[in-house]
C-alpha cells in the first residue's frame, strides 16, 4: 500500500474468486507456500498503474514473442474492439526468480475494465468458471 496500489484480493470474504490470487502481491503477500519468502510478483496492471511499464499495443494479427515477466518488463495490450477503458494485458509468467513457486508457466491474459473500481468493483466479481463470465 506504500506505493498507492489497492488490495486486489477478494474483498467479499468468501474467497470464491480469490481476486488475483498468487499472481499479484496486492492479492496474496504470503506466497504460494505461506512463508512470505517469495511473495507474488506485481501484475502488469499494478506495474502500469505505477508507471513502471509501457505496454506494446497489438493492433493486427501476427506472431509475437514475449519473454518471462520476471526477466523483462514486456507486456502486450489489446484495446480493440473493447470500449474505452477496457483492454487485455498479456504477460508471460514463468516459475523463475520471485515467481519460482508458480505451479507452471505460460501466457497470462488479464481482462481489465478500468470503469470497475472502488465499491462497484467489489460487488461485481468476475473469474473463469463463474456463472455469466466474462460478461459479469
Image (cartoon, helix red, strand yellow):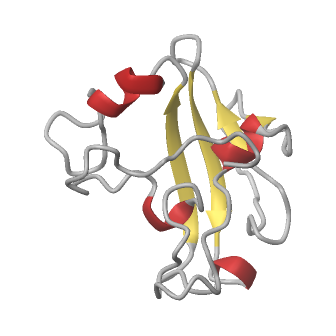
Which residue: 71% across, 39% down?
Answer: 4
Residue 48 lies in quadrant: top right
Q: Is residue 110 left or right of 63 when viewed as pictured?
A: left
Horizontal and vertical percent position of residue 88: 57, 36
Rendered position, 47 above or below 99: above
Residue in the foreground of this view, choosing between 48 and 93: 48
| Residue 20 shown left or right of residue 92 in the figure | left
Is 77 rendered above or below residue 11? above
State which quadrant residue 70 falls in.
bottom right
Kindly give the residue lying farthest to the left in the view shown.
131
- Taking depth in this image into account, of 40 and 66 the one nearest to the observer is 40
Q: Tell me residue 126's x, y (percent).
A: 30, 39
Q: Position of residue 30 (x, y in %)?
A: 51, 75
Q: Quadrant where the C terminus lies?
A: top left
Q: Residue at x 17, y 33 (%)?
A: 132
Location of residue 134 with respect to 100 vertically, above or below? above
- Name the side, left or right, on which 103 lies relative to 98: left
Q: Residue at x 74, y 49 (%)?
A: 2
Q: Position of residue 37 (x, y in %)?
A: 64, 87
Count of numbered circles in the view:
0
Amino acid at each position: 500500500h506504500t506505493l498507492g496500489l489497492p488490495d486486489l484480493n477478494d474483498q467479499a470474504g468468501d474467497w470464491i474468486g480469490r481476486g488475483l490470487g498468487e499472481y499479484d502481491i496486492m492479492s496474496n503477500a504470503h506466497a504460494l507456500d505461506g512463508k512470505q519468502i517469495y511473495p507474488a510478483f506485481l501484475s502488469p496492471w499494478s506495474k502500469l498503474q505505477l508507471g513502471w511499464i509501457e505496454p506494446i499495443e497489438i493492433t493486427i494479427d501476427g506472431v509475437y514473442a514475449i519473454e518471462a515477466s520476471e526477466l523483462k518488463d514486456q507486456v502486450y495490450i489489446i484495446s480493440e474492439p473493447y470500449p474505452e477503458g477496457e483492454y487485455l494485458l498479456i504477460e508471460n509468467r514463468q516459475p523463475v526468480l520471485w515467481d519460482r513457486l508458480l505451479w507452471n508457466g505460460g501466457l497470462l491474459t488479464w481482462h481489465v475494465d478500468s470503469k470497475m473500481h472502488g465499491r462497484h468493483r467489489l460487488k461485481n466479481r468476475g473469474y473463469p468458471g463463474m456463472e455469466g463470465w466474462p460478461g459479469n
